[in-house]
Structure formats: C-alpha cells, structure tokens
Image: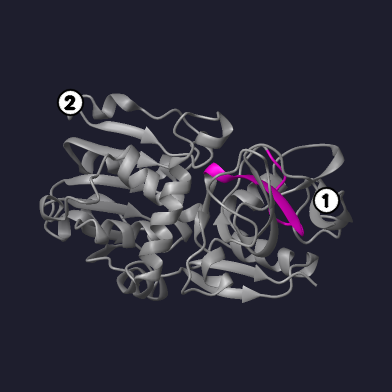
Amino acid sequence: MKAIGFKEHLPIESKNSLVEFELPKPAAKGHDLLIKVEAVSVNPVDTGVRKSGHGILKQPKVIGWDAVGIVASTGDKVSLFKEGDQVFYAGSFKRPGSNSEFQLVDERIVGHAPKNLSIQQAAAMPLTSLTAWEALFEQLEIDPHAQTLNHNKTILIINGSGGVGSIAVQLAHWAGLKVIASASRPATIEWVTKFGADQTVNHRQDLVKEVRNLGYKYVDFILELNDLDGHWNEMAELIKPSGRIASITENRHPVNLRKLTQKRAKFAWEWMYTKSFYQTPDMITQHQILDQVADLLDKNILRSTLNKTLSPINVPNLKKAHQLVESNHMIGKVVISALE
C-alpha cells in the first residue's frame, strides 16, 4: 500500500520533509479495524512530530491523527463495527498514522462517521472534538447536561478560532455556559462569534483588563489552547475561587501552581492520546464521545470546522497543509481527501 511519512526531521520546504513509499498492507487482529482511508486532516501535532527530533530514522514514520474511512476488515474481538461501516477517528500516538491507504485502529477509539456530512467535513472533527470534549467535560468537570445551572457560569477560551477552540466554543455554548473566546483579528472574531461565543477578548492585549472591561472580575473556567507560559499569570488572576483551569499546550517553564493556592483553584492537563497511550480502562469513552459528536453534527447542534480542502492525498498537498498549520494563522481545519 502507499504511505506518506518521513525519515528526517526537516523544514516542510525541504524536498524530503515528507516522502511517499510502499508498506505491506496490515492485517486486523483482536480489537483492531483495518480502515481504508478516505480523507485526513492535519493538526499542530503532525507538524510538531515531523519537525521535532534528530538524526535519520531507520524506517519511515507515518503520521496523521485524523481520518474518515471505511472498515475493510475486523479483528476477531471487534464488536462495535462491521465491514463497510464508515468511521472517523484520531488514532493513537504509538501506531502508524492515517497518511496511508490503509490503517489499523483500535475500535474503542473509533466512532461512526456523521451521516449528514461530507467526508471532508467529518475528517476535520475527531482529534479536536475529543480534545475539547475531554477538556471541558472531564478535566474541567463541566456537566454538559446541566444547561440551566451552567447559564450562571462563564468560561474563557484562549485561542477560540483554532481547531480545538472552534469545537470548544460550540460545546461550551451547547452546555449552556457564557462563552468568552479570545481572538485577535477581524476574521477570527467573526469565526468564534459564528460558532457561539457570547463575547470576545484579544489575547494579544492584557487579558485581565480585556475580561474585566466586559464586566467580569473572575471567570468560573478557563480553557487554555495557546501559550500557557504567556497567559499563566493572567489566568491565575482571572480564575474564580474554587474555579478550574485546563490546558492542552506545552510549557517551557514550570507552572507556578502556588498562584492558585489562595483561590483553591484546580489545574489539569488534557492530552487526547492518554487513553490509547496507556490503554486505560476507560479507553472506550473515546468511541462513545465520537458517536455523540457525530449525533450532534447530524442534528446541526455542532458544525464542522473545515475551512480548506485539498485533493488528492499526496506529498505536495500534505506539504501545503503542513505549511498552513505552521503559519499559525489557520482558522479552523484543513483536510485532504481522496488518494490518487
């Protein structure tokens, strides 16, 4: 089968930053599904893994952590899917990725694809939806079904127009929260407002002043999606006593949790891959979350964050997608569909 990956950690402009090669088609065993990949999207994790590292790999590494495809075959322990099902998923950090004709994925982290969306619209959703859902409803411990209670609570989402932010704004709005999303350009302000942000602030300015100018001394929840180091002091000041903060971004400096002591506030990390990486007992919750996300998409409660489509899935188009993501100006998601 065809696959696309890399052996060297190179800038995307370099000739060999991504290359096409042949791999044996894998066989499904146990809980695995063998998926024929139809569309993929590119996330910051793709560019980060491609760039980070030294030396030349012995075998090419296939990346890609978002896909829509058809179940081609199933392992002997599979109970959630059958051959021919259309599915969507974000995959595992420990296994070959979706930038190939076929991919093995554990059924417990796979969802039934939305029925009313195109494959491109669906491929934009798995990783960011899982991240946003787990951050809001598991790490921040917001009850998505307590809309009446949540109407009195406020969340600040830092970087609301990115891939995860675009979903988090929608899910927080659906859960009944008052949503303040940060955005710094007219296009991103328009984007987050379209997806349900009640108010916006500019993360390039002093966030404390920005939020307080809206009339809030503190916020109940903060979801940090870009530049933890740069925003930590602002978040510590803005979080309500007994409030909760969650972050998905890596920090260069130790987080000073002492700043939360007097407020008795909680801080949590969200890493979408944790469940599959450690094979946690609750790994199947990712299957359940994706099925719920598909249902919300089919009911138009959630909208796809697809913003650019490329075709077919080949080296030039994957390079273009990586460049778009690396620009840090990408609004929503970029998807590549249909193998040559």
The residue range painted magenta reads 95-108
The relative height of residue 266 versus residue 17 in the rendered view (above or below) is above
Q: 243 left or right of 314?
A: left
Name the residue rendered at 33%, 39% in the picture: 138
Bin the neighbour count of mark 1 within 10 Å (Cα to Cα): few under 14, some 14-19, many 20 and up. some
Labels 2 and 1: the sequence-earlier one: 1
Name the residue rendered at 58%, 56% in the picture: 43
**Residue 64 x %, y %:** 66, 53
Looking at the rendered image, the quarter that the N terminus falls into is bottom right
**Residue 84 x %, y %:** 64, 62
Q: Is residue 312 magenta?
A: no
Q: Quadrant of residue 100?
A: bottom right
Bin the neighbour count of mark 2 within 10 Å (Cα to Cα): few under 14, some 14-19, many 20 and up. few
- Asked whether the viewer can see residue 198, the reply is yes
Q: Secondary structure at mark 2?
A: loop
Q: Nearer the viewer, residue 268 or 262?
A: 268
The residue beneath circle 2 is: 262
The residue beneath circle 1 is: 25
Measure the C-alpha gap from mark 2 to mark 1.
Answer: 56 Å
**Residue 298 x %, y %:** 40, 70
Q: Secondary structure at mark 1?
A: loop
Q: 8 left or right of 210?
A: right
**Residue 195 x %, y %:** 33, 69
